[in-house]
Image (spheres, rainbow, N blue to C red):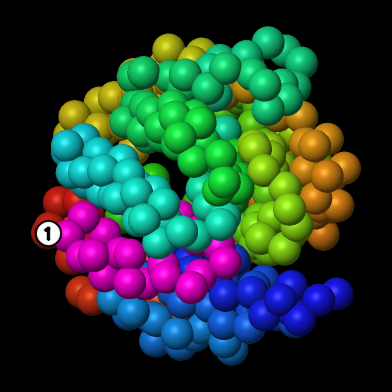
Amino acid sequence: MSSAAQSRRVVVVGGTGNIGTSVLEALSAAPEVAGITALSRRAPEDLPAKVTWHGVDLCGDDLVPHFEAADAVLNLAWIFQPTRDPIATWRNNVLGALRVFDAVAAAGVPALLHASSVAAYSPGPERPVDERWPTHGWPGAAYSREKAYLERVLDSFSREHPEIRVVRMRNAFCFKPESASQQRRLFLGPLVPEQLVRPEMLPVLPALPGLRFQAVHSDDVGDAYRRAVLQEVSGAFNIAADPVIDNEVLGEVFGAQRVRTPRVLARTALAAAWQLRLVPASPELFDTFMRLPLMDTSRARSELGWEPEHSSIDAVRGFLAGLRATEGAPTPPLAPELPGGRAEELATGVGRRQ
């Protein structure tokens, strides 16, 4: 291996969240990576080896100086909240990403890796879809619209900058124990007690017709990014672990009897809780979730040599264990509790940016 290949310099935009922290750990452990610059809005308390942090406003600061001399830029920055203000999430997620892409081109960075999602895909058939499936998302939810829009932007970017290697990671739901508290704040809200995720507290589990989704451990996603940084690959990669999570698997994980629950009933209950500002996740996000296709991960396994170390069930169980233990990590997004605890979440408004 050449000395150039052993001295990669990587910039990670958004390295303090669920996926970002796993990506930093994976890159830090790679001997081929000489240095990593992490850019985010808020400072982490601790950083892996080789990582230097700089605070940036994604939508205001000049990003080009941070990207100069980088061999790859990873765009992982994303916010889910405020869930009731799609203009705010569009400004950060879409316009912020456009500024990252433009700065990559201006700085002459040879590789751009972007965090897309299974939510970028259009609803699919019963069979798993590969990376050629349309990425028009589901228009009802901001998250899916934003992910799909950026796929179109990257289509144009790739045509305009053929000299830049562009990689899109379309991952399934990412879980690890350290992200459990953040994900509870983002999707479940402050009124969900951790005791409810204990098997003995859930003798029955609602079973929604057609429920099925894919999951993956965040550390395995970090490994996929590491491989994509170090190999001369381009294009999209589906990232998910086996098996597919469905009602039967969830019943086994929770050790609970499944009770068939009409989807319309579940959505109506969620919509009522949303209207009462009791939960941060909107009913439109539920609509997206129920329409997600299953992904074929053959390309990641064959071209990246990627194999997840954790099963999807391990990832879900780790999340539940982290939820029960109020686990977190030393970064602002992954903090076990916000200052002021759940009372602060309620006082500032469920679903506001954290």
User: Above or below — where is 124 with respect to 104?
Assistant: above
- Alpha-carbon neighbours of circle 1 within 10 Å: few (<14), some, or many (≥20)? few
The stretch drawn in magenta includes residue 63? yes
Q: Is residue 197 magenta?
A: no
Q: Residue furthest left?
A: 347
- Estimate the x, y position of residue 145 in percent, counting from the top left: 37, 27
Q: Residue at x 80, y 37 (%)?
A: 299
Asked if 159 appears above or below 136 in the picture, the reply is: below
- Name the secondary structure under disc 1: helix
Majority secondary structure in the magenta region: loop
| Left or right, residue 330 beside residue 177 | left
The image quadrant that residue 283 belongs to is top left
Image quadrant assignment for residue 220:
bottom right
User: Relative to the observer, which residue lies in front, 82 or 261?
Assistant: 82
Q: What amino acid is at disc 1?
A: Ala
Which quadrant of the rendered structure holds the C terminus? bottom left
In the drawing, does residue 109 fall left or right of residue 275?
Answer: right
Give the magenta-colored segment's residue range: 56-80
Question: Quadrant where the N terminus lies?
Answer: bottom right
Q: Mark 1 — residue?
A: 347
The x, y position of residue 89, in whole percent, is 25, 43
**Residue under the point 21% across and 43% down:** 91
x and y, in percent, of residue 101 in the image:
39, 48
Q: Residue 149 location, x and y as percent?
A: 38, 28
